[in-house]
Image: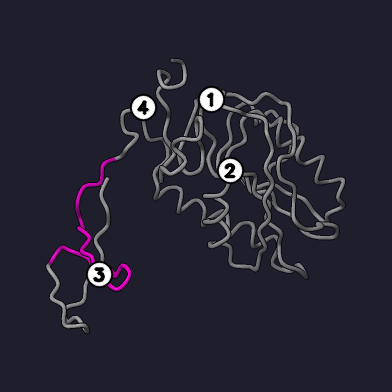
Amino acid sequence: MTLQGSVTRAHPVDGIPRTPGIATHRRRGTLVAVAANLPVADPYADDIDAILITEDQIRERTAELAASVASRYADIDEDLVLIGVLKGAIMFMTDFARALPIPSQMEFMAVSSYGSSTSSSGVVRILKDLDRDIEGRDVLIVEDIIDSGLTLSWLMKNLATRSPRSLEVCTLLRKPEAVRSPVRVADVGFDIPNEFVVGYGLDYAERYRDLPYIGRLKPSVYSS
């Protein structure tokens, strides 16, 4: 993995010389040199079996999903309410909101159904609820992954009791079992195999969320 090079000034305004191939920034008034175009080690490389979806593929598909969603909500009277489920959806939801060419407002919920296991338990409880009333609002649930669809089905029923004007789902990833779920998903980024994946917000035991790609975790990591 390579860190993209930073743009450096040919004629620095502060009189401090720059070295080609070295980017600089200020930290508390002190100029600090940062190496550019150098290999950056993946701290989780030994745990990842394969990269399934690259950072560029995620970026491109997110833009396509945002355009699709915007076309459906272009004429609504109030800002679209985006609801992300913590913690997994935070990366995708943030990038999705930035790519969305219509005004939106972000809300978050936290529910418990996974723990540190590799599959959903189907038992859901709310750890953090919404901070606002969604009655009469157009609401889009922004998911990182739909695994079995059990958690999403519960969440849809819960939010429907709050009388939103409309309620739809957009997900970055969907597994095969979720395709058979009765929950209708309006927008799907990628259909993926039934494998345990991490990265871009997805975790195993709170690790790997910070990876910029979607990778398949080695079974030895979660079976040991």
Whole-percent x and y of residue 216? 42, 29
- Where is mark 3, residue-wise? 7
Q: Nearer the viewer, mark 1 or mark 2?
A: 2
- Where is mark 4, residue-wise? 49
Say whether residue 144 is left or right of residue 29: right
Residue at x-position 55% and y-position 39%: 173
Residue type for callout 2: Lys
Say whether residue 105 is left or right of residue 54: right
- Where is mark 2, residue-wise? 87
Labels 4 and 1 touching (C-beta < 8 A): no
| Residue 35 among magenta residues | yes
Q: Quadrant of the C terminus?
A: top left
Q: Nearer the viewer, mark 2 or mark 4?
A: 2
Distance from label 4 to label 1 (Cα)?
A: 14 Å
Residue type for callout 3: Val
- Mark 1, secondary structure of its residue: loop
Using a 10 Å C-alpha cutoff, classify the residue at mark 2 as few (fewer than 14 neighbours), some (14 to 19) or many (20 or more): some
Q: Which mark is residue 20?
A: none
Using a 10 Å C-alpha cutoff, classify the residue at mark 1 as few (fewer than 14 neighbours), some (14 to 19) or many (20 or more): few
Distance from label 1 to label 3 (Cα)?
A: 42 Å
Q: Nearer the viewer, mark 2 or mark 3?
A: 2
Residue at x-position 23% and y-position 65%: 32
